[in-house]
Amino acid sequence: MRVVKTVLALVAVALITGCAASGPKYTEIAASIPPVPANKGRVYFYRADTMFGAAVTSDISLNGKVVGKSERGSFLFADENPGKCTVATSTEVEKQLTFMLAPGETKYVETSVSMGVMVGRISPQLVGAEQARNEISSGLAYTGAPLAGASAKK
């Protein structure tokens, strides 16, 4: 019985460990990220590489359009028209974040997992630029749209 429990625990750890996002790291593509267009703002989305809620994912919507997925250890960005922006994530419930975006401005949204009734909930929150840049450059994988001149490794 003890051996069965140990094997099941190892299988569970292996499955959870395999749930991190894959893609080029920030340091591999940083030079390929274009500047923010003058008539747009940019929103970065990221999720830390933590074990808690590792298998829980959600689409990320910006103003009603899916721009990517909240996955463990990932980041992406979307350029958006200035004005009121609403970010939404959804598992068993929808979580929203609303903020104003100015032309040429960059905002950073961290998505994180919290406990839910049946499944974890993914919540978006604005974070400061310095904190976000440190976390994104710490080894998170880019999962956004292909970038011209970026490394094609996945």
Image (cartoon, grey):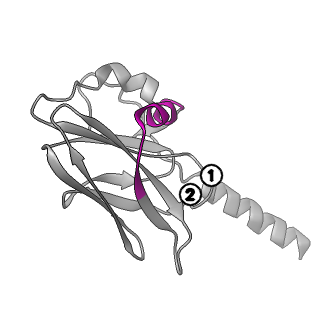
- Mark 2 highlights which residue? 54
Furthest-left residue in view? 39
Is 40 covered by the magenta stretch? no
* Residue located at (14% from left, 43% from top): 82
Q: Amino acid at mark 2?
A: Ala
The N terminus: image quadrant: bottom right
Q: Which mark is residue 17?
A: 1
Q: Residues within 10 Å of mark 2 (few under 14, many from 20)?
A: many
Q: Amino acid at mark 1?
A: Thr
Q: Which mark is residue 87?
A: none
The span picked out in magenta is: 124-138
Between 141 and 65, the one nearer to me in the picture? 65
* Residue located at (68% from left, 63% from top): 12
Res 46 → quadrant: top left
**Mark 2 and mark 1 residues within 8 Å of each other at the beta carbon:** yes
Is 137 covered by the magenta stretch? yes
Q: Position of residue 152 (x, y in %)?
A: 35, 29
**Label 2: element kind:** loop
* Residue located at (52% from left, 61% from top): 113
